[in-house]
Amino acid sequence: MSFVRAPTAVVSAFLAGICAFLLLALTLLTTGSVGKSDAPALVQPTLAAPDLPALTSLPDRERASADKPLFHPDRKPHLAAADAGAASSAETATVAPFRLKGVVMANGMARASLMRDVEGDIEWVNRGTDIDGWTLESVRSDRVVLSRGGYRTTLLLYPDR
């Protein structure tokens, strides 16, 4: 039976050594210099406002660049309210409110399928026919030309190409 007691005595001695080490570490942490902190006991908050730099107005150059639209391809300043009305009326006269959806050219007849941007209605129009004040002047396989008064506009079948 002595061969069973020998490993038990070694394990018991090992565990006793670990317990002694932990007891010594606990004693040093609670009473020694390791356990003491140098922080003050109580920290009082201050209610004074931090010093901020004085606000200054932007120079004219920086203000002008801030007025420009950020992602517009031309990066032009926005139109003033008075110019906006004139620009929108000119824009409505020169830009047709349609998108070209299809073209049929057969037996000497040319037709275009136009979709209205506002309502989303699709209408087939023959060459020379008026639609919402616009006249379909010419039809090609990939584009149509519309006119209204003295203005002309071209609608592409594949505008992304």
Image (tube, helix red, strand yellow):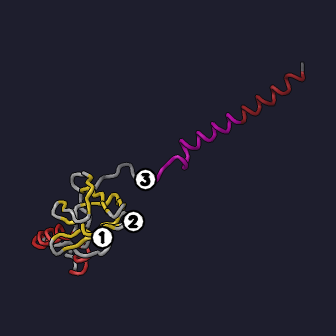
Q: Residue at left 25%, top 67%? A: 51
Mark 2 crowd level (few <14, some 14–19, many ≥20, 10 Å Cα): few
**Magenta residues, dominant SS class:** helix
Identify residue for label 1: 72
Q: What whole-number distance in Å separates the C-alpha atoms at marks 2 and 3?
A: 68 Å
Q: x, y percentage for residue 21?
A: 67, 39
Residue 28 lies within the magenta run:
yes
Whether tag 1 and tag 2 are in contact, CB under 8 A, the answer is no
Residue 21 lies within the magenta run:
yes
Mark 3 crowd level (few <14, some 14–19, many ≥20, 10 Å Cα): few
Quarter of the rendering occupied by the C terminus: bottom left
Mark 1 crowd level (few <14, some 14–19, many ≥20, 10 Å Cα): few
Quarter of the rendering occupied by the N terminus: top right
Identify residue for label 3: 39
Which kind of residue does numbered mark 2 sit on?
A: Asp
Most distant residue in the right direction: 2
Q: Earlier in the sequence, mark 1 or mark 2?
A: 1
